[in-house]
Image (cartoon, rainbow, N blue to C red):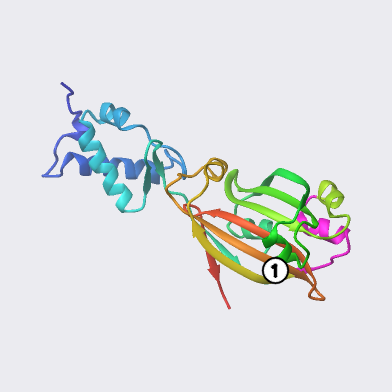
Amino acid sequence: MNIVPPAMQRQDGIALWRQIAASLQGDIANGAYTPGGRLPTEAELSARFGVNRHTVRRALEVLSREGLVRVEQGRGTFVTEDVLDYTVEQRTRFSEWIRRHNKEPSGQVLQLREIPADAQTAAALELRTGATVVLLERLGLADGRPVSLTRHHFRLRGMLDALRNQPSITEALKFVGVADYQRQVTRVSARLPTPTEAELLRMPRNRPVLICENVNVDSAGAVVEFAVGCYPTPRVQIVFEP
């Protein structure tokens, strides 16, 4: 039989699960568990506080309702992360967006190659279906945590080599003669992530992702890019401002 340690004795009528919730809340506030970090298992917390798992579970339910943690079935309990506002503007740039939140942007190229355009991509880029386009699939990170998974499509000659040799999409477009570009169309929807998306974005399968379809044009109004971005709702919300 577990013995409740003195810190978890009933105090002035305060239930044990409330004391546990307050203790874990203090740990989170003090940085013992960082945003996105996993809390100990129910069994480990039961041993730490000397109570049964039902009592621990009730404490975690309170923290979940208060928005301090999220419980992922089969994965554990995690500290809720800061939600980044992704503001859709005429000139939305990934690095600027992340730095605006005082975080360090980085990225991982998953694939860069030429592909035949499907019907959706061809229509957005004003090409015939099956025309050759450049695909850049990139995982975007903020302080090392994934916040976007985007498939960029380009119709410009020389863009494949430009993306191989330039540090960013903006610089690659400049290299092929596009000095500036801006957002023409943005469409937003939501759905559950695929297994691959959930793994790459490090998120549960039962939480939705935001899908953002963008068409970017140059200063003359010619289409230069069609992008489909996938954003994890635990970390990102999309904001439209006039």
Residue in the image at 18% along x and 23% along y: 2
The boundaries of the magenta stretch are 167-181
Mark 1 Cα shell of 10 Å, populated few (<14), some (14-19), many (≥20): few
Residue that sits furthest to the left in the current view: 13
Decide which of 91, 37 is in the foreground and name it: 91
- Of the pair 22 and 156, the residue shown nearer to us: 156
**How many numbered badges does the structure rendering display?**
1
| Residue 130 rendering spot, x and y as whole percentages | 77, 56
Q: Is residue 24 above or below residue 86?
A: above
Left of 40 or right of it: where is 239? right
Is 238 part of what is drawn in magenta?
no
Kind of residue at disc 1:
Arg
Quarter of the image with the C terminus in it: bottom right
- Give how far across and how far down residue 117 sits, in percent: 74, 56
Is 58 in front, or is 99? 58
Residue carrying label 1:
91
User: As drawn, which residue projects farthest toward the bottom?
Assistant: 242
Residue 127 coordinates in the image, percent (x, y): 78, 65
Residue 147 drawn at (x, y percent): 57, 51
- Element under disc 1: loop
- Is residue 189 in view? yes
Q: Is 58 above or below relative to 94?
A: above
Left or right: residue 91 versus residue 23 is: right
Please tell me whether residue 69 is drawn above or below residue 227 in the rendered image: above
Which quadrant would residue 55 be assigned to in this image?
top left
Q: Is residue 89 visible?
A: no
Residue at position x 46%, y 42% in the image? 34
Snapshot quadrant of residue 74: top left
- Considering the image in quadrants, where does the N terminus appear? top left
Q: Quadrant of residue 153?
A: bottom right
Relative side of 146 to 218, left or right: left
